Amino acid sequence: MRGPTTITPVPGRTDEMILNMGPQHPATHGVLKVVLGLDGERITRAVPHIGFLHRNHEKIEEARTYIQIITYTDRMDYVSGLQNELPFILAVEDLLGVEVPKRAQYIRVIFFELYRIASHLVWLGTGMLDLGAITPFLYTFRDREKILEIAEKTAGARMLPNYFTFGGVRRDVHPEFFKDVAAFLDFFESRLPDYRALVLDSPVFQARAVGVGVLPKERAIARGASGPVLRASGVAYDVRKAEPYDAYPELEFEVPTRPEGDVYARFWVRFREMEESVKIIRQALEKVPKTGPYKGKVPPRIKPKPGARYRAVEISRGHLGAYVVSDGSEYPLRIKHRSPSFANLQLIPDLFVGARFADAIAILSSLDPVFGEVDR
Amino acid sequence: MSLFAEVWEAVKAVATGLETVHKRVRQPPATEFYPYKKPEIPPVSVQFLALIQNEDGSDRCVACLQCERVCPSQVITIERKRNPEGKGFVLERFDLDFVNCMYCANCVEACPVSAIVTVGAFEHAVYDVNLLKADKAYLDHLGREAKIWYSPKFGVEMRTPEGKIVKAPPEMQPGGLAELLKEAEGGEGA
Ligand code: SF4
Ligand code: SF4
């Protein structure tokens, strides 16, 4: 059944105020409009309006060759740009039957986790900004800058590098890459206690976050939530463990979960994920062959055999999938992207109703949507 | 918790925050003083595209149309004619619309002769959007200005002060690690 698309005032009811939050509200991290019905401080009704950033990705991609599409996939979730390329590439690699060399797999994993840290740093900074704390924002963006510099040296761009390709990665890494990454990890680990002290352990933040926006496990599963939002409700589902890709089966890491399902739990899970990413990258740096091929054998013209394939990866926001249907020509017949923020945003009516208006901001930033990917 | 304990907790939290901030106050600023100090752009970074000419001033481009074909936003327009002396084609027109370019470097990746390359010139903000619709003369100009550039076929190349085009040392090459490791091993063996 279709839900209501807007809120109309109830005749005769004077205690409810209708308020438009967005689409240009600074706390909506992009362009989201939520129509709220307010009874004093309490939210009685909430209807999200999405689609302001719709760019017709899936249709455009039908008219592009496979190698051109990689450029477009970057532009979905621009905060963790590089991660978005992978599901599409994995699906096409399966259709092509291409082998990815071990070295390329590890380089992919290192980049993948670096971008997870970068994305979570943006979330931590802007999330705290929404709650009124400015200092973490300055710190996290400086740390993220270091990741982007490492990426630029090898991948050729900071946010939308277009670096992964069929069969591996596009070019070999910069000679200093592994050294840079190891140096960054040391630096970043010395920072983590600061963030913990400023954010997670701060009683001021806890007073704002504990017990706010509680998402029960059943609701999270029913709405198709994924990523940290799902794991903060006590479901240990992670695509890296459930359907491992690239070099993940050879790496050891934990999937942090938390049973509470409130804003604090979602902050906590993302925070722990950054620590796990550091662990993953350290192992990958040890195991990656320092020299060797960075790209497998790929036919010069990418023409996958007819068929369909669905592959998913765990990006910073959750389960990102790509469904590719090939008819054997140079152009795909149909591509569908399953994006995590879109599903996570469906929780807005569940979480907002009954919360205080000021808490709505905290709840939204704990969902961490990126609208390039919600609207595609 | 009594009110007094709650207030005490909050004061303690603010103090912890201030302490963390205080540790960082004396550190040097993380920002760069652009435009007084220009950032160093790695050559693989896609800031701008340029056409490289050979040392004798002839075009490297052989008008094979690979870059035009692979461009996702269809911003390269090439017109070519048969070479009057000898085989192949020569360029008549090479337009690149930097306004709609996505800076994905697919064209650089596809070029078989390393004619179109990425260069580090990044200050191309202009008042008139039409100034970013580059023609061949402008792309050639960018190529002549460039000191260092990258293309997958030849790797990072540099122009010496005398105008010679040389390959950059392995410390700057993507994948230079293999060569460096081999050199280090050879050094130890000798
Ligand atoms: S960088 Fe990409 S969009 Fe720009 S001209 Fe080259 S192929 Fe086209
Ligand atoms: S791919 Fe290279 S050689 Fe071919 S037309 Fe483009 S610039 Fe010229």
Image (spheres, coloured by chain):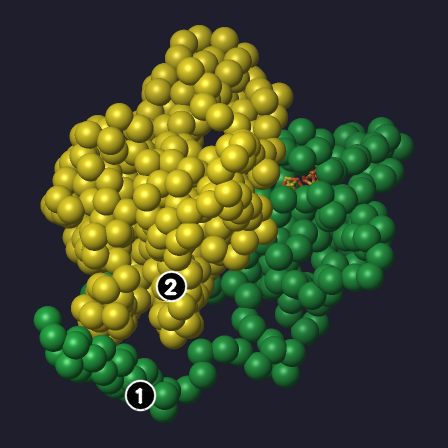
Residue at 46 percent of width and 19 percent of height = A2
Horizontally, residue A282 falls left or right of residue A317, namely: left
Vertical position of residue A321 compared to residue A283: above or below: above
Q: What is the crowding at mark 2: few (fewer than 14 residues within 10 Å), some, or many (at least 20)?
A: some
Query: Which color is chain B depicted in?
Result: green
Q: Residue furthest front?
A: A12
Depth check: A116 or B50 in front? Answer: A116
Residue B22 got which mark?
Answer: 1
Depth check: B122 or A235 in front? Answer: A235
Residue A44 in the image: state x and y as whole percent: 39, 40
Q: Is residue A242 visible?
A: yes
Residue A100 got which mark?
Answer: none
Residue type indicated by callout 2: Leu
Residue at 61 percent of width and 78 percent of height = B34
Q: CA distance from mark 1 to mark 2?
A: 21 Å
Vertical position of residue A244 compared to residue B152: above or below: above
Question: Helix, strand or loop at disc 2?
Answer: loop
